[in-house]
Structure formats: structure tokens, C-alpha cells
Amino acid sequence: MRPWLAATALLLALAASAEEPAPARAPERDADPEAIAIVARMTELLGKVQSVHYVSDTSYDAVQPDGQKIEFGAHREVTARRPDRVRLDTTDRDGSRRTIRYDGKLLSVVSEDQKVYATIERAGTLDEIVDYVNADLGIPMPLSELFSPDLPKLLDDEMVSARYVGAEQLGDTRCDHVAFRNEEVGVQIWIAQGGAPLPRRIVIDYESSVGEPQFRADFVKWELAGRAPDSLFAFEPPPGYERITFVPRKRSLPAPEAGR
């Protein structure tokens, strides 16, 4: 499982464990019911909204050959509408800008700094399109699975531990700080208290990766009401931009199990 998917799987497994009886776990696993309930309220809210718009500032570590961590980051604006509309606008810290749109039929990617675009006709749900963009095209869409219209059925044994850290203040928002982990990643998440339990900050530690880099996301704006118009997801080639072709990459096969 890819590390970012493992983090998402852990989130959703936590939510699932609060809704149905938990299977027997190994004794070393420790799940705080309060932490599980808080994450379950968040995923329940995000799972039922028809349209979502959020703005985030993200940063991530790039581990260099000498072991030093160099931080990069981006400003992202995401709009998704069930069952099959999504738009992601990204501005990197160096000023590079790119946009991904899907209108239910046509997937498009535009790079403003390179003045190129690519399109492909493809049918699918948000889950399917996000997976295609991430896995087949190799274009990251960080945390997109958190807002998937169909939360996948995941095994509860993704979780090793979950605990409630405490109530903390982020800006003008009082949040519940929870931490959980599995064999690949450690995740911390700050979820707003009150009637709209939305994530305000997420930190992911890739504990199994060389240098244990981090990914961080601060959510600065949320909109759950209203219906995003079709025009937001539609694509028209920008004047003067060159059309290029997507080159899907082959998915890697899982490693064989020992003894086979």
C-alpha cells in the first residue's frame, strides 16, 4: 500500500470501528474510544456532503542524499461535487501553477508555467478518477481520498494505536487533537470542535521511509453548502498553450509473499 493511501486507510478504518463491533485485535494494539469517535464524526460529515470546497497550505520534506530534509510546499484549492466532478488548483512556493479538472467525461491537466495541457476522455466516479490520476498518471492529489464520495471498505486492522491528545487552539478554532498510527505512518489530526467537525490541520510522519519525512496540511477555508456549477469543472484550451499527451505509467505489482 502506498504511504499516503495507508494514512487514508487508517483514518477510514478508525471511523468504521466506531460504527460496528470491532474484530478481535492483537493485545499490543491500543485504540482510545474517544479518539475513534472524534474521527468518526469527521468522516461521517465529509462522507455525506454533496459538494465540498476547501483551501489548504501544505508542506512536505524531501530527504536529500546526504540525509538533510528540505521543505517544499504549495497552496491548494480543491472543489469536489458528487458523484463525478473535481477541480484542484495548485500553486507551488516557487510560483508554478497547475490545474486538474474532471467534468464527468473529460480529465484535463494544465501547467501554466510550461504553457502546456493534456486531456483524456474517461468515465468514472471521484474515487476512480483520483486513483487514476495518482496511480496511473503519477500526479499527486494529497489527501483526496479523505473526501471521496464512496468511503472504501477497509480492514480495521490497519490501525495499531489511536489516542486522544487533548483540546488545543488553532487560530480562532478550538480543536480536538488526536494521534494514530499503523506500521507505515503516524498521523496527527486537529478536528474542530462543535457542530462542524472538520479537519484544521493534518501531519503525517512516513515512519517507514528513509529519513522519516513529514507531510503537513493546514486547512484555511471550508465550504460545504451550495452546489458548485458545471462551469467550474469544464475545460477550454488556454490560448497559446501547447497540447501534449498523457503517458500513463504501469502500476507496480505487489511483492510476492515469503515462501511463494
Image: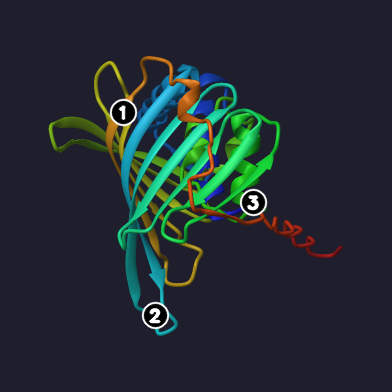
Q: Residue at x 57, y 22 (%)?
A: 21
Is there a contact, CB below 8 Å, between mark 2 and mark 1?
A: no
Q: Answer above or below: position of 67 versus 17.
A: below
Residue 84, x across and y down, in percent: 59, 26
Q: Is residue 65 left or right of residue 84?
A: left
Q: What crowding class fits label 1: few (fewer than 14 Cα within 10 Å), some (14-19), or many (20 or more)?
A: some
Residue 26 visible to the viewer: no
Q: Which residue is mark 3?
A: 135
Mark 3–mark 1 Cα distance, whole angstroms, equals 27 Å
Residue 147 position within the rendered picture, expressed as x and y whole percent measured from the top left: 48, 31
Residue 120 x %, y %: 67, 43
Amino acid type, label 3: Ala
Towards the viewer: 209 or 64 = 64
For marks 2 and 1, give the CA distance: 36 Å
Q: What kind of element bears circle 2? A: loop
Q: Residues within 10 Å of mark 2 (few under 14, many from 20)?
A: few
Depth check, front residue: 240 or 69: 240
Mark sitting earlier along the chain (3/1): 3
On screen, residue 134 above or below 25: below
Q: Is residue 141 shown above or below 121?
A: below
Query: In 3D space, how far apart are the residues under numbered discs 3 and 2 (Cα atoms)?
Result: 27 Å
Based on the displayed image, in which of its 4 quarters is residue 200 positioned? top left
Say which residue label 2 marks: 67
Badge 1 marks a residue whose secondary structure is strand
Q: Nearer the viewer, residue 162 or 229?
A: 229
